[in-house]
Amino acid sequence: MPMSGLLDLTLRHAPVRRLTADDPGHWLAAGWRDFRRAPAVSLSYGALFVAIGYIGVLGLFNLGLESLVPVFLASFFLVAPIFAVGLYEVSRRLEAGERPVLGAALAAYRRNPRGIVTMGLVLMLSMAAWAQVAMLLFMMVFHANPPPLEDFFYGILTSRQLVWFIAVGGVSGYVIASVVFAISAVSIPMLLDRDIPVGAAIATSIAAVRENYLVMFGWAATIVFLVGIGLATMFIGLAVILPWVAYATWHSYRALVV
């Protein structure tokens, strides 16, 4: 088969449905039902997110890079979809009438290891790109490595390059986050659910976002708002919010992809 034909097969996306503004509310309701049907697995898995959050923050403090905590928190949004793959498995099992267990959730990547690991690498690369952009911005403002946290906000607010810092940082963050959301909105649940190439899953995710741009933009904003609440509670709220959002994401995939 010619290479062009192979690429065409790999990148051909599945049919996607058109949404209404009410759909995200239905996904959240369905996600909460899944949480209530599997509270022990949900909270146990959610506790892992809390632990990851604390380990990451404490690691930065120990390295003297505490001013990078905001960058770490922003990066959390970029890689959370791959860490949530076990929670997608919980919803998949509930939907199939199977009993969800923590062991199966933690081993969910085995259903499509190549595809899921590849998506994980893509998201990790996006996080690395964001970290590099942030470091460059810090160096442009402070002309050195990131300062201690107590000097960070004062240094930013009094910098002559404040407007430039906010503009470039905001645009860079928005572009990276938008790309990550577009390629991962339904691709990871789809890779868990179906034996398909990564390219087809990413193409389907992009098509789903493109065909329902306004609804999916609102859905992305809802996710950021809810996860932001979890982060604002010193990560504790993530034990509930992340499983809930992950279950809702599974139902968004089921609603979007034919």
Image (tube, rainbow, N blue to C red):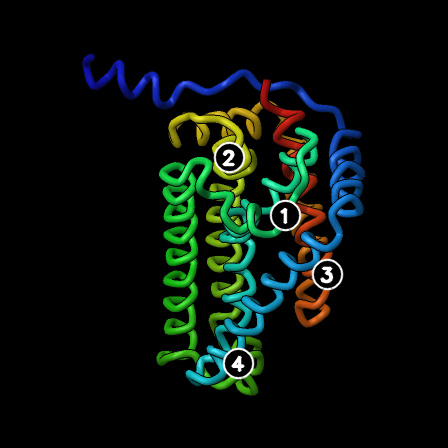
Give the foreground label among 3 and 1.
Answer: 1
First along the sequence among labels 1 and 2: 1
For marks 4 and 1 on the same chain, the one whose residue lies earlier in the sequence: 1
Q: Is 228 situated left or right of 207 in this image?
A: right
Which quadrant would the N terminus be assigned to in this image? top left
The amino acid on which the numbered mark 4 sits, given as a three-letter code, is Phe
Callout 2 amino acid: Leu
In the image, residue 144 sits, relative to residue 131, either above or below, namely below
Q: Residue at x 38, y 27 (%)?
A: 197
Q: How many marks?
A: 4
Chain-order first, disc 3 or disc 4: 4
Which residue appears at 37% of the width and 74% of the height? 139
Tag in front: 4 or 1? 1
Q: What mark, if any, has residue 192 been given in the picture?
A: 2
Give SS at disc 1.
Answer: loop
Q: Which residue is mark 3?
A: 229
Which of the labelled discs sits on residue 127, or is there none?
none
Q: Give the label, 2 or 4, closer to the camera.
A: 2
Q: Residue at x 47, y 70 (%)?
A: 161
Instruction: Report how far apart the C-alphas of labels 2 and 3 lie in the structure.
Output: 28 Å
**Helix or strand or loop: what does disc 3 sit on?**
helix
Disc with the residue nearer the chain's start (3 vs 1): 1
User: For the residues carrying marks 1 and 2, which lies nearer the camera in this image?
Assistant: 1
Q: Of 220 and 87, which appears nearest the observer?
A: 87
Residue 120: where, in percent of width, then height?
A: 42, 47
The residue at which mark 1 appears reads as 101
Residue position for label 4:
152
How far apart are the two marked residues, 2 and 4, measured between alpha carbons?
41 Å
Measured along the vertical axis of the image, is residue 81 above or below residue 58?
above
The residues bearing labels 1 and 2 have C-alpha atoms spaced at a distance of 16 Å
Three-letter code, disc 1: Val
